[in-house]
Image (tube, helix red, strand yellow):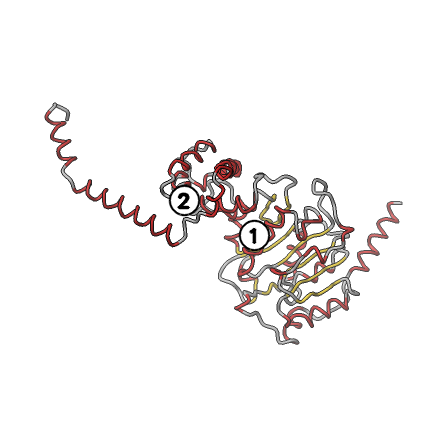
Amino acid sequence: MKIVNSIGLSFCQMMQRLPPLPSIQEIIRIYGLSARKKLSQNFLLDLNLTKKIVKSAGILDGCIVIEVGPGPGGITRPLLNSNANKIIVIEKDSRFLPSLQILAEASKQRLEAIHGDILSTNLSSLIPSACQTQWDSSPPLVHIIGNLPFSVSTPLIIQWLHSISTRSSAWSLGRIPLTLTFQKEVAERIVAPPKSEYRCRLSVMCQYLCDVKLKFSIPGRAFVPPPKVDVGVVHFVPKIKPLINQPFKVVEKVNRHLFHLPNKYCSKAVSTFFPLEREDLCTDMIELSGINPEKRPFELSVEDIRRFCDAYVEILKREPELFEYDFRSQASSKERRNKGNLIQSLEDQIGNSNHFDDDESYLKGVGVR
């Protein structure tokens, strides 16, 4: 029985293999393709590295794989040579569609190429409902993978994190994992723990919703044209239960305020949540959260930030209109600058006064040296 299964698997694997095709370099030459700077395109042509990206995604047997921005097909080819059931590629640049069609025909239509912008694509419409699994069970046989253009990577992952939080778009079908490339510094920020120099709001937004892991790095020189930075490959698996049980917009706003001043005390960051005249609410938020006000935002754990989110929501229950307050608005910024200038002026006056000289004379007069 084991021999039969082994032979059957080998036969299936042979059936999945692509026939001999022109190399990616030859495809680029035949179709006159080149990377466009305005689209932040960088081709990864080394098949050893593209195979490594596919391998880092985990077991893809029987999966539907959605690839974002396939370009000339560097990652697409090893995907087609895997045991994935179907590969759907979404490409914004129409120049690549003819070369992707070659792969579609060679794979006997296991590949479907879609011309579109990933930022406006409803992924759930591409996935059969039969793939759906319960959120608290294993992830469905669906995987999202992509060598993302630098210009779109951060807004795209924020958009997808929002969908994960609301279990919408592709994540209406379950906890679909992702394997994506980012600039190495962005990748390090995504996985950064508390107290890391890379800790930022993106760290928290990713980690409260997903288990994240930096799989490996790729030197910039491996790409064509080579970017000035290296690249990191990050694997995401949505958590069954988010670490912060508040609406995404609340969590995003709390993180935006806290990490606006990442190296200042939390008390300073909390002061930006409310109008200047509402110092009472700053005190309330610190007390409700139970967080040491002298902690700095980059030192905070996701649990600490959960407590800040819960405290903020408690205050909003009393005064919901405060959610619309934006310390960055022109009026608020001007008010804060004026207060800052006033405080600086008072400090200058104190510094230039003779009060400290008088104190020193008094101390000497009473015999204190």
Q: Is residue 154 above or below residue 317?
A: below
Residue 133, horizontal then vertical, whole percent: 74, 45
In the image, taking residue 64 as reference, residue 227 lies left or right, namely left
Report the residue marked by disc 1.
158
Residue 111, horizontal then vertical, whole percent: 74, 63
Give, as a three-letter code, the residue at label 2: Thr
Q: Is residue 71 above or below residue 357?
A: below
Q: Nearer the viewer, mark 2 or mark 1?
A: 2
In the image, taking residue 274 as reference, residue 48 lies left or right, namely right
Q: Nearer the viewer, residue 25 or 39?
A: 39
Q: Nearer the viewer, residue 87 or 331?
A: 331
Q: What element carries label 2?
A: loop
In the image, taking residue 218 as reference, residue 288 lies left or right, namely left
Residue 245, horizontal then vertical, whole percent: 58, 39
Report the residue marked by disc 2.
272
Give, as a three-letter code, the residue at label 1: Ile
Separation of residues labelled 2 and 1 (CA atoms): 23 Å
Residue 363, horizontal then vertical, whole percent: 14, 27
Of labels 2 and 1, earlier in sequence is: 1
